[in-house]
Protein backbone atom coordinates (compact mmCIF):
# COMPACT_ATOMS: atom_id res chain seq x y z
CA UNK A 1 0.00 0.00 0.00
CA UNK A 2 1.19 3.48 -0.79
CA UNK A 3 1.42 5.75 2.22
CA UNK A 4 -1.27 8.41 2.45
CA UNK A 5 -0.12 11.92 1.55
CA UNK A 6 -2.76 14.59 1.95
CA UNK A 7 -0.63 17.32 0.43
CA UNK A 8 -0.24 15.24 -2.74
CA UNK A 9 -4.00 14.65 -2.81
CA UNK A 10 -4.64 18.39 -2.58
CA UNK A 11 -2.09 19.06 -5.32
CA UNK A 12 -4.14 16.83 -7.66
CA UNK A 13 -7.06 19.16 -6.97
CA UNK A 14 -9.85 16.58 -6.83
CA UNK A 15 -10.87 13.47 -4.96
CA UNK A 16 -11.18 10.67 -7.51
CA UNK A 17 -12.35 7.68 -5.45
CA UNK A 18 -14.24 6.79 -2.31
CA UNK A 19 -10.87 5.88 -0.80
CA UNK A 20 -9.58 9.39 -1.52
CA UNK A 21 -12.77 10.80 0.00
CA UNK A 22 -12.54 8.72 3.18
CA UNK A 23 -8.83 9.52 3.48
CA UNK A 24 -9.65 13.23 3.15
CA UNK A 25 -12.34 12.98 5.85
CA UNK A 26 -9.89 11.25 8.17
CA UNK A 27 -7.17 13.81 7.46
CA UNK A 28 -9.63 16.62 8.10
CA UNK A 29 -10.26 15.25 11.61
CA UNK A 30 -6.50 14.95 12.20
CA UNK A 31 -5.83 18.46 10.93
CA UNK A 32 -8.56 19.85 13.18
CA UNK A 33 -6.52 18.64 16.16
CA UNK A 34 -3.09 19.54 14.74
CA UNK A 35 -4.10 23.15 14.02
CA UNK A 36 -4.02 23.85 17.75
CA UNK A 37 -0.25 23.28 17.80
CA UNK A 38 0.45 24.21 14.15
CA UNK A 39 -1.87 27.11 13.14
CA UNK A 40 -0.16 27.26 9.72
CA UNK A 41 -2.06 24.07 8.81
CA UNK A 42 -5.39 25.92 8.64
CA UNK A 43 -4.93 26.69 4.93
CA UNK A 44 -4.24 23.03 4.21
CA UNK A 45 -7.39 22.05 6.09
CA UNK A 46 -9.46 24.63 4.21
CA UNK A 47 -8.21 23.32 0.86
CA UNK A 48 -8.98 19.77 1.94
CA UNK A 49 -12.47 20.71 3.11
CA UNK A 50 -13.11 22.32 -0.28
CA UNK A 51 -12.24 19.05 -2.03
CA UNK A 52 -14.50 17.13 0.36
CA UNK A 53 -17.47 19.42 -0.31
CA UNK A 54 -16.91 19.19 -4.07
CA UNK A 55 -16.76 15.36 -3.94
CA UNK A 56 -19.89 15.12 -1.80
CA UNK A 57 -21.72 17.46 -4.14
CA UNK A 58 -20.82 15.33 -7.17
CA UNK A 59 -21.27 11.88 -5.65
CA UNK A 60 -23.55 11.98 -2.63
CA UNK A 61 -25.96 14.89 -3.03
CA UNK A 62 -28.65 13.02 -5.02
CA UNK A 63 -29.86 10.58 -2.36
CA UNK A 64 -32.33 8.86 -4.68
CA UNK A 65 -29.56 7.84 -7.10
CA UNK A 66 -27.14 6.35 -4.59
CA UNK A 67 -26.71 2.72 -5.60
CA UNK A 68 -26.06 -0.34 -3.49
CA UNK A 69 -22.72 -0.64 -5.30
CA UNK A 70 -21.79 2.91 -4.27
CA UNK A 71 -22.68 2.12 -0.65
CA UNK A 72 -20.61 -1.08 -0.76
CA UNK A 73 -17.65 0.82 -2.20
CA UNK A 74 -18.05 3.46 0.49
CA UNK A 75 -18.08 0.88 3.28
CA UNK A 76 -14.98 -0.84 1.88
CA UNK A 77 -13.21 2.53 1.69
CA UNK A 78 -14.24 3.37 5.27
CA UNK A 79 -12.83 0.04 6.48
CA UNK A 80 -9.58 0.54 4.56
CA UNK A 81 -9.05 4.03 5.95
CA UNK A 82 -9.93 2.90 9.48
CA UNK A 83 -7.25 0.20 9.19
CA UNK A 84 -4.84 2.71 7.67
CA UNK A 85 -5.42 5.15 10.53
CA UNK A 86 -5.03 2.37 13.07
CA UNK A 87 -1.67 1.49 11.48
CA UNK A 88 -0.51 5.14 11.43
CA UNK A 89 -1.52 5.63 15.06
CA UNK A 90 0.25 2.45 16.15
CA UNK A 91 3.39 3.32 14.18
CA UNK A 92 3.46 6.78 15.76
CA UNK A 93 3.06 5.25 19.21
CA UNK A 94 5.89 2.77 18.56
CA UNK A 95 8.25 5.45 17.22
CA UNK A 96 7.55 7.87 20.08
CA UNK A 97 7.88 5.10 22.64
CA UNK A 98 11.23 4.04 21.21
CA UNK A 99 12.43 7.66 21.14
CA UNK A 100 11.49 8.02 24.81
CA UNK A 101 13.31 4.78 25.68
CA UNK A 102 16.42 6.22 24.01
CA UNK A 103 16.11 9.55 25.82
CA UNK A 104 15.07 11.37 22.64
CA UNK A 105 12.10 13.55 21.71
CA UNK A 106 10.15 14.11 18.48
CA UNK A 107 12.32 17.12 17.62
CA UNK A 108 15.37 14.81 17.75
CA UNK A 109 13.69 12.50 15.23
CA UNK A 110 13.26 15.49 12.93
CA UNK A 111 16.94 16.31 13.31
CA UNK A 112 17.92 12.71 12.53
CA UNK A 113 15.70 12.67 9.43
CA UNK A 114 16.69 16.23 8.44
CA UNK A 115 13.10 17.53 8.74
CA UNK A 116 11.72 20.49 10.65
CA UNK A 117 9.31 20.11 13.57
CA UNK A 118 6.16 20.74 11.52
CA UNK A 119 7.16 18.32 8.76
CA UNK A 120 8.01 15.61 11.30
CA UNK A 121 4.63 16.10 12.99
CA UNK A 122 2.87 15.74 9.62
CA UNK A 123 4.79 12.51 8.96
CA UNK A 124 3.92 10.98 12.31
CA UNK A 125 0.25 11.97 11.97
CA UNK A 126 -0.18 10.61 8.45
CA UNK A 127 -0.61 13.97 6.70
CA UNK A 128 2.58 13.42 4.71
CA UNK A 129 4.04 10.09 3.74
CA UNK A 130 7.37 8.91 5.07
CA UNK A 131 9.96 8.37 2.39
CA UNK A 132 11.55 4.96 2.04
CA UNK A 133 14.80 6.47 3.34
CA UNK A 134 13.04 7.92 6.41
CA UNK A 135 11.59 4.54 7.34
CA UNK A 136 14.86 2.71 6.77
CA UNK A 137 16.69 5.24 8.97
CA UNK A 138 14.06 4.85 11.69
CA UNK A 139 14.41 1.07 11.42
CA UNK A 140 18.21 1.17 11.63
CA UNK A 141 18.61 3.90 14.25
CA UNK A 142 15.67 3.12 16.52
CA UNK A 143 15.74 -0.66 16.00
CA UNK A 144 12.06 -0.87 15.07
CA UNK A 145 10.92 -3.89 13.07
CA UNK A 146 10.17 -3.02 9.44
CA UNK A 147 6.69 -4.56 9.60
CA UNK A 148 5.83 -1.94 12.25
CA UNK A 149 6.94 0.85 9.91
CA UNK A 150 5.63 -0.17 6.48
CA UNK A 151 1.89 -0.51 5.81
CA UNK A 152 0.90 -3.74 4.05
CA UNK A 153 -2.78 -3.09 3.40
CA UNK A 154 -3.82 -3.91 -0.16
CA UNK A 155 -5.86 -1.14 -1.83
CA UNK A 156 -9.38 -2.05 -2.97
CA UNK A 157 -8.63 -1.58 -6.67
CA UNK A 158 -5.66 -3.95 -6.51
CA UNK A 159 -7.64 -6.51 -4.52
CA UNK A 160 -10.32 -6.56 -7.20
CA UNK A 161 -7.78 -6.92 -10.00
CA UNK A 162 -5.91 -9.74 -8.25
CA UNK A 163 -9.11 -11.61 -7.38
CA UNK A 164 -10.14 -11.48 -11.03
CA UNK A 165 -6.69 -12.70 -12.08
CA UNK A 166 -6.73 -15.55 -9.58
CA UNK A 167 -10.14 -16.68 -10.85
CA UNK A 168 -8.72 -16.77 -14.40
CA UNK A 169 -5.81 -18.99 -13.41
CA UNK A 170 -7.58 -21.12 -10.80
CA UNK A 171 -8.33 -23.77 -13.41
CA UNK A 172 -4.61 -24.58 -13.39
CA UNK A 173 -4.97 -25.90 -9.82
CA UNK A 174 -3.15 -22.94 -8.37
CA UNK A 175 -3.59 -22.72 -4.62
CA UNK A 176 -3.69 -18.97 -4.12
CA UNK A 177 -6.08 -17.63 -1.55
CA UNK A 178 -7.48 -14.21 -2.30
CA UNK A 179 -8.81 -14.05 1.24
CA UNK A 180 -5.23 -13.31 2.28
CA UNK A 181 -5.52 -10.05 0.37
CA UNK A 182 -8.41 -8.78 2.47
CA UNK A 183 -7.57 -5.36 3.72
CA UNK A 184 -9.08 -5.27 7.11
CA UNK A 185 -9.42 -7.55 10.05
CA UNK A 186 -11.02 -5.11 12.44
Image (cartoon, helix red, strand yellow):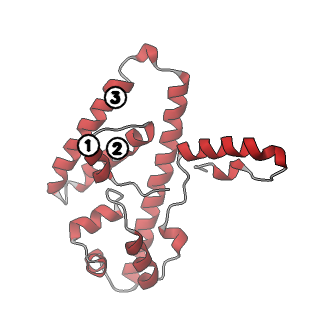
* Circle 2 crowding by C-alpha within 10 Å: few under 14, some 14–19, many from 20: many
Q: Residue placed at 27% from the left, 37% from the top?
A: 51
In percent of width and height, residue 161 lies at: 61, 43
In percent of width and height, residue 165 lies at: 68, 44
* Circle 1 crowding by C-alpha within 10 Å: few under 14, some 14–19, many from 20: many
Q: Nearer the viewer, residue 161 or 127?
A: 161
Q: Assign a secondary structure to mark 3.
A: helix
Q: As displayed, is residue 100 above or below residue 49?
A: below
Q: Label 2, label 1: how many angstroms apart (C-alpha)?
A: 7 Å
Q: Earlier in the sequence, mark 1 or mark 3?
A: 1
* Circle 3 crowding by C-alpha within 10 Å: few under 14, some 14–19, many from 20: few
Residue at the top extreme, as displayed: 64
Q: Label 1, label 3: how many angstroms apart (C-alpha)?
A: 12 Å
Disc number for residue 56: 3
Q: Earlier in the sequence, mark 2 or mark 1?
A: 2
Disc number for residue 24: 2
Q: Nearer the viewer, residue 169 or 148?
A: 169
Residue at the right extreme, as displayed: 173
Q: Residue placed at 45% from the left, 71% from the top?
A: 94
Q: Label 3, label 2: how many angstroms apart (C-alpha)?
A: 12 Å
Q: Assign a secondary structure to mark 1.
A: helix
Q: Earlier in the sequence, mark 3 or mark 2?
A: 2
Q: Residue placed at 29% from the left, 61% from the top?
A: 122
Q: Is residue 160 left or right of residue 166?
A: left
- For mark 1, what is the residue? 48
Q: Is residue 144 left or right of residue 127?
A: right
Q: Residue placed at 32% from the left, 83% from the top?
A: 104
Q: As displayed, is residue 22 above or below residue 149?
A: above
Q: Is residue 21 left or right of residue 39?
A: right
Q: Assign a secondary structure to mark 2.
A: helix
Contact (CB < 8 A) between labels 2 and 1?
Answer: yes
Amino acid sequence: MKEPDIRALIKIGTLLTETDYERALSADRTLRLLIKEEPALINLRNELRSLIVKYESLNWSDIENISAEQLTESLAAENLIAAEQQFISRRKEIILSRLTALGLIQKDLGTLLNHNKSYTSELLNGIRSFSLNDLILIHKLLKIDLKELFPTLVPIEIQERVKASVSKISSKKVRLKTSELELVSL
